[in-house]
Amino acid sequence: MEQLKHECGIAMIRLLKPLEYYQQKYGTWMYGLNKLYLMMEKQHNRGQEGAGMACVKLDTKPGTEYMFREKAEGANAITEIFGRVHKRYATLSCEQLSDAEFAKRELDFAGNLYMGHLRYSTTGKSGVTFVHPFLRRNNWKAKNLCLCGNFNMTNVDEIFDKITAQGQYPRIYSDTYIMLEWMGHRLDREVERNFVAAKEKGLEGTDITEYIDNNVQVANVLKTTMPDFDGGYVVCGLTGSGEMFSMRDPWGIRPAFYYMDDEIVAVASERPVLQTSFDLECDDIKELHPGEAVIVTKNGKCSVERILEQRGDSACSFERIYFSRGSDRDIYRERKQLGAQLMPSILKAVDYDVEHTVFSFIPNTAEVAYYGMLGKFKEYLNEQKVKALEAFDRKPTKEELIKILNSYVRSEKAAWKDIKLRTFITEGNTRNDLASHVYDITYEVLERGVDNLVVIDDSIVRGTTLRESIIKILDRLHPKKMVIVSSSPQIRYPDYYGIDMARLEEFIAFRACVELIRERGMWQLLRDTYDACKAELRKPKEEMRCCVKDLYKPFTVDELNSKMVEMLRPAEVSTPIELVFQSIEGLHDAIPNYKGDWYFTGDYPTAGGMKLVNQAFVNYMEKIYDKN
């Protein structure tokens, strides 16, 4: 019910044929540029803060540009950057625009390699400076590097110290920029290795340059760079000499999918993006495995290479629950199952009174789970109809049959997203009042005081929108009881791999836990956990455990749910409210191949995650001590 801002999106295309081929077959040499636009628009759900794209031309002459980049901020950034490019073509004749040779020679972004990025920041740093792609320039083609990615690194401080100790002097402290400099340094070494090899072969002048451009091994760069990084990532890059790569982290946290044929190599953050953009079947597309990279050389040789050994099996489950497009075949099935397997808990919450229960969903991302929930209730109701028919010791009358068969699951669109609060309204009370009207209801879809209302969401994180808007607005329907359902388990722990969930105190589950600790006089548990976190932080991070788990051990899920209801209930609402969450076991049953569940369990896949969650609780406690 509250929008979760989240990780970035990536798109890459390598054209394996000359531009003339695409002009002849598809009617335009802009085939790659147009496909990049489509891929980025299809991933607009992944980044609303900014967008950028880059392009590399092959086989250009000295003195002409061969690397191009555009970046912009804001929700309309995709339209803006592509608009700028097409504005440069506005004065050209139809003949010029259909001349692939002219385009290669004269036009920006008439290239062979394309990269696109959609940004959402999780570090608090904003501005066009931090919009990807990042670009490192050099007069040697092969030393030019353009980089973008979907990632958040947990050990930027360590990498920063390492490269400054070598004499480098980064201008910006961010994981992307530091990665650019570290990878650029290793790319320089790879170019120099080829320079030495070329000299040993007796080559001179431009023959050395040609040898370098044709023999750069990006895998060497990745193998000497990426072992140092801890975090969830898909890192994408283009070199000025025409190498392309996309690498996935060895824990498999962040997703990447690719497609290859004799015309293109394409990479994206989500499978349906490739299916739609290139009219492909689901099984045509491959998922990049943890620790692997898709690499295309200047000469168009395509390969998937293992860069790092797989270190874990922690593909992010939140990708499946919420972030990725529900049009993916497998994600659609998984979300339906998440909703379906909540049926027994919901049934208990409404005291088995399906006849007087209306089912709905908020927001749209919960719609598929809603269908799964409805499907399971229909099965349940059919079972009840069969039992009712079997109970007759005589032939039922027509009226009796009609009454039984007319029992149905009541589904309604109970709430609507109505307005977007404008940022120019900043005064607290006014802003809160307007926020409470972001949603509106469909009046009189319930019988007042008789019908229960069940509303399913995909996740409950902070609870702010529930408290400030949703519960109040739904209470206007005057339900007998309100049941708010989450298709995901209780979110108890921050994310450090690219999703905007970085502070413990933001989570309603954590706040409820602390409130129970206070009510029961268990202050020592907070102090002991603080001391334990401090002790863990003195260890090598590879030996750390998540001490924050200790806070939850004394309490059942139901106790936390009840406390959350107390904290979320507006003062003016007296309707009985119950929260129903997915279980951890239910999550794993529905999404068996995506085991990354640290949001719910505290089982972080990397040492950096363990370190940061312990530090987060230390920071939380020290803020409390400072106030007191």
Image (cartoon, rainbow, N blue to C red):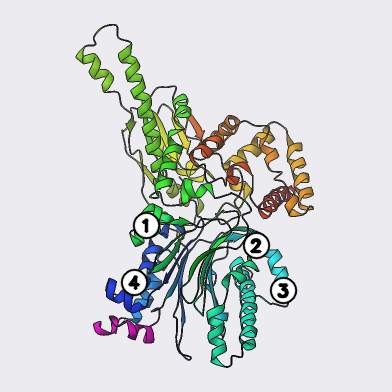
Mark 4 highlights which residue?
A: 31
What is the distance, in whole Å, between disc 4 and disc 3 at their CAs?
42 Å
Asked if the residues shown at circle 4 and circle 3 are in contact, with their CB atoms under 8 angstroms apart, the answer is no
426 shown above or below 554? below
Segment colored magenta: 91-108
Whether residue 526 sits left or right of residue 324 in the image: it is right
Q: Position of residue 572 (x, y in %)?
A: 47, 35
- Furthest toward the left, the residue is 398
Q: Nearer the viewer, residue 208 or 606?
A: 208
Q: Secondary structure at mark 3?
A: helix
Asked if the residues shown at circle 2 and circle 3 are in contact, with their CB atoms under 8 angstroms apart, the answer is no
Q: Secondary structure at mark 4?
A: helix
Q: Position of residue 200 (x, y in %)?
A: 64, 87
Mark 2 highlights which residue?
A: 229
Q: Nearer the viewer, residue 402 or 228?
A: 228
Q: Secondary structure at mark 1?
A: helix
| Quadrant in which the N terminus is drawn | top left
Label number found at residue 275: 1
Query: Which callout, 4 or 2, points at the residue further toward the start of the chain?
Result: 4
Asked which quadrant contains residue 489, the reply is top right
